[in-house]
Image: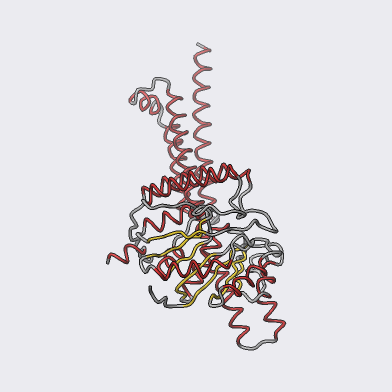
């Protein structure tokens, strides 16, 4: 009898831990968005993950039922599979984002360099003293300062 | 025979080539005086920009290193914006002999349907010229056969960066140019946009200062990356219009 009670309370404790974890994830993401450290676009997926953990924690037996429905009879395996796919999707998403950002970065650097060259040429034409022009002609694009 | 409208521009990408860039600029001005010279300084840490400006070139200085693809594209953007009708790219390290520029131009002007002329090291067997190490030649031959197969034309030196394009080529490359190790992909890009290219034989020199853009260590990555790019490129061969962007050259042409 005592063993069963102990077992039950362990399970209950674990559920509470999971729920707390999920709430912490959601609050953390919310706080990052509130401080504008995280864009809504990227927050949505993480919030979805947090809410999923929350629902699984609150709704007793949902995970077991879902995993049985797809033919996995050891519920944690289903959870790991889903979590792994989620992380994989996020990483691919980040790789695509990095590619886009570096492409935009490249275009910005090119535009900056071309504008700088044009500006230097115009400055030279309006007749500032030769030393200034020479200096301007060889100034680096200027992100370093 | 055709008349080229717009000026002539030589684009010289240079990364830490303070020892060679001035000489390169002077040689271009001497061998091809009708060409303006633009040096694209790809984030050099030495005085490459100053040396180039002193030799009389226009200098575009990138704020940080973009790699040869990004630097060349900046050059083509410059050519497009300043209305140049012909652009030739000449490496800043002195490998490309400026005396071939008039020959490239003659070939381009001779055939109005040509959009690009490349200087090839392997078109004619020549003595004394620089043709790279045996391993690299094998790699180049592999690329040559792949590029020839995909583009259905005879290409002998797909890795040569010594090439001249007309206005259409300038517009294409200003908008879309491969990121790193761009030469092989650029030929296929041309082909995908239904632009035509040809080769003429040239002799290249051994570089005198600085170091090659590709070390032996990077050669493996180079091979795999370019093969992937070629493979993927075949599947996107049809240029399509993206809303809000300039139409691809071929799309423009078919309208």
Residue under the image location 43 percent in, 47 percent down: B230
Residue at x 48%, y 77% (from the top left corner): B7
Q: Is residue B219 left or right of residue A83?
A: right
**Quarter holding residue A70:** top left
Q: Position of residue B154 (x, y in %)?
A: 41, 52
Q: Farthest residue to the top: give it.
A: A1
- Where is residue B236? Give x, y as percent: 36, 51
**Label tally:** 0
Task: State the image coordinates of residue B62 (x, y, percent, origin top left).
Answer: 60, 65
Q: Residue at x 64, y 62 (%)?
A: B94
Between B196 and A56, the residue placed more toward the observer is B196
Q: Give whichever of B126, B217 is nearer the camera.
A: B126
Above or below, B130 against B252 in this view is above
Which residue, as the protein is rendered here, is positioned at the far left?
B255
* In this picture, residue B150 sits left or right of residue A31: left
| Figure coloring | secondary structure
Judge whether A82 appears above or below B64 on screen. above
> Where in the figure is residue B38, as x and y percent of width and height?
57, 71
Q: Is residue B85 left or right of residue B128?
A: left
Residue extending farthest to the bottom is A127
Relative depth, front residue between B157 and B128: B128
Determine whether B136 is above or below A56 in the image. Answer: below
In the rendered image, the quadrant that contains the C terminus of chain B is bottom left
Residue under the point 55% across and 56% down: A35
| Quadrant of the drawing holding the N terminus of chain B | bottom left
**Residue sitting nearer the eye, B179 or B108:** B108
Q: Is residue A60 above or below residue A93?
A: above
């Amino acid at each position: 009898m005592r063993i069963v009670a102990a077992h039950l309370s362990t399970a209950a404790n674990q559920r509470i831990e999971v729920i707390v974890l999920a709430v912490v994830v959601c609050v953390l993401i919310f706080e990052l968005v509130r401080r504008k450290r995280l864009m809504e676009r990227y927050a949505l997926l993480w919030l979805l993950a947090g809410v999923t953990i929350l629902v699984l924690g609150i709704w007793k037996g949902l995970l077991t039922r879902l995993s049985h429905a797809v033919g996995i009879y050891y519920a944690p395996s289903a959870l790991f599979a889903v979590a792994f796919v989620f992380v994989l999707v996020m990483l691919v998403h980040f790789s695509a984002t990095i590619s886009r950002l570096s492409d935009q970065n490249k275009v910005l650097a090119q535009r900056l360099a071309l504008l700088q060259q044009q500006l230097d040429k115009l400055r030279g034409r309006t007749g500032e003293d030769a030393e200034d022009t020479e200096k301007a002609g060889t100034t680096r694009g200027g992100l370093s300062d | 025979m055709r008349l080229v409208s717009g000026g002539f521009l030589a684009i010289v990408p240079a990364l830490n080539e303070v020892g060679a860039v001035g000489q390169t600029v002077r040689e271009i001005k001497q061998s091809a005086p009708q060409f303006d010279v633009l040096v694209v300084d790809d984030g050099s840490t030495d005085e490459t920009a100053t040396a180039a400006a002193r030799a009389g070139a226009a200098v575009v200085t990138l704020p940080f290193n973009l790699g040869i693809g990004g630097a060349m594209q900046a050059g083509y953007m410059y050519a497009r914006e300043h209305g140049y009708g012909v652009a030739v790219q000449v490496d800043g390290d002195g490998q490309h002999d400026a005396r071939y520029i008039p020959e490239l131009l003659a070939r381009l002007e001779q055939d109005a349907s040509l959009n690009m002329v490349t200087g090839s090291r392997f078109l004619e067997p020549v003595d004394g010229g620089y043709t790279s190490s045996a391993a690299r030649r094998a790699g180049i031959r592999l690329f040559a056969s792949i590029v020839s197969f995909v583009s259905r034309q005879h290409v002998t030196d797909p890795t040569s960066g010594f090439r001249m394009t007309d206005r259409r080529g300038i517009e294409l490359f200003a908008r879309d140019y491969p990121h790193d190790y761009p030469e092989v992909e650029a030929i296929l890009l041309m082909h995908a946009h239904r632009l035509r290219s040809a080769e003429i034989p040239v002799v290249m020199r051994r570089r005198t200062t600085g170091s090659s853009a590709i070390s032996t260590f990077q050669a493996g990555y180079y091979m795999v990356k370019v093969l992937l790019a070629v493979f993927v490129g075949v599947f996107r061969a049809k240029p399509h219009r993206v809303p809000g962007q300039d139409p691809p050259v071929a799309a423009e042409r078919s309208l």
